[in-house]
Image (cartoon, helix red, strand yellow):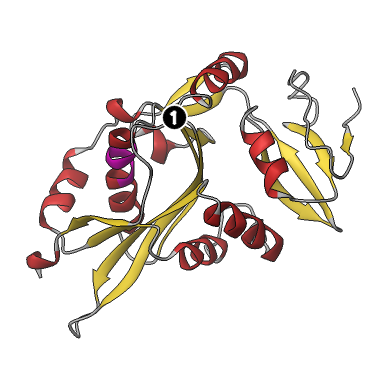
Amino acid sequence: MRIPFLPPNDYRFPEQLCGLDEYDGLVAVSSDLAPERILSAYRLGIFPWFMEKGLFYWFATSPRAVLRPYEIHIGRSLAKTLRNKPYRVTVNKAFETVMTGCAGVPRPNQSGSWIKNDFITAYRKLHHMGHVHSFECWFPNGKGGEIIAGGLYGVQIGRVFYGESMFALQPDASKIAFAHAVKYLAECGIELIDCQQDTHHLARFGSELMDVGDFQTELRRLNALPLDCAVSQKVLADNFDKV
């Protein structure tokens, strides 16, 4: 099987994701990262992973790690942190700070981040289009103000939220942001969160594995459904009175 090179201005992807093991999930290569191409990819369970020598590499994984928002598991330790730690969680207040924060986090077995300037530019456009959302966790700075301590961002199409990346500069910050993000997304009508990778961290929140064919079937159904309410800029939690 040959990996297709996607022509410019044609944003279609192969819908049948066959032979994923042969190339470690690589399904296509393109010379652009147009927002329309990104949306087309996510609708099929495909995502851009990295850029090399001006080319973008598109992947899919099987099985796929997903989370049903209403089935999220909050462990005892995190529940205590959510009750007692001083923090504030916001939506879409500092998108670029979150994305650059994710880009700066060292990753195991990786020499650098895949979130280069081209990715930031493309996802910024999607953010302005209302398809990419960030969740921020703020901690008190000890001087009466606040500092961003962690967060996450992802792509939203219909009733699916495709988680992209998260970071934490302070302990528990990304977990706090994620817990509140999942609850809020469920309230908005999100029925499925794509976690992409099967990690112990996400498994503790209750993620499960889904065959890529079943995953695509769910995407076709849920991507076409509108949300109950839009994901908008707001404060989700304010625990600063715990200081």
**Numbered range of the magenta stretch:** 181-185
- Reply above or below: 190 against 90: above
On-image quarter of the C terminus: bottom left
Left/right placement of residue 39 relative to residue 238 reads right
Q: Which residue is mark 1?
A: 226
Left/right placement of residue 142 relative to residue 5 reads left
On-image quarter of the N terminus: top right
* Identity of the residue drawn at 77% across and 44% down: 57
* Identity of the residue drawn at 68% across and 35% down: 41
Where is residue 217 drawn, in percent x and y? 57, 15
- Reply above or below: 195 against 51: above
Where is residue 170 drawn, in percent x and y? 33, 65
Closer to the camera in the image, 124 or 29: 124
**As drawn, which residue projects farthest toward the bottom?**
143
Indicate the quadrant where residue 86 lies.
bottom left
Is residue 73 visible to the viewer in this orientation of the structure?
yes
* Identity of the residue drawn at 58% across and 59% down: 124
* Identity of the residue drawn at 76% across and 54% down: 51
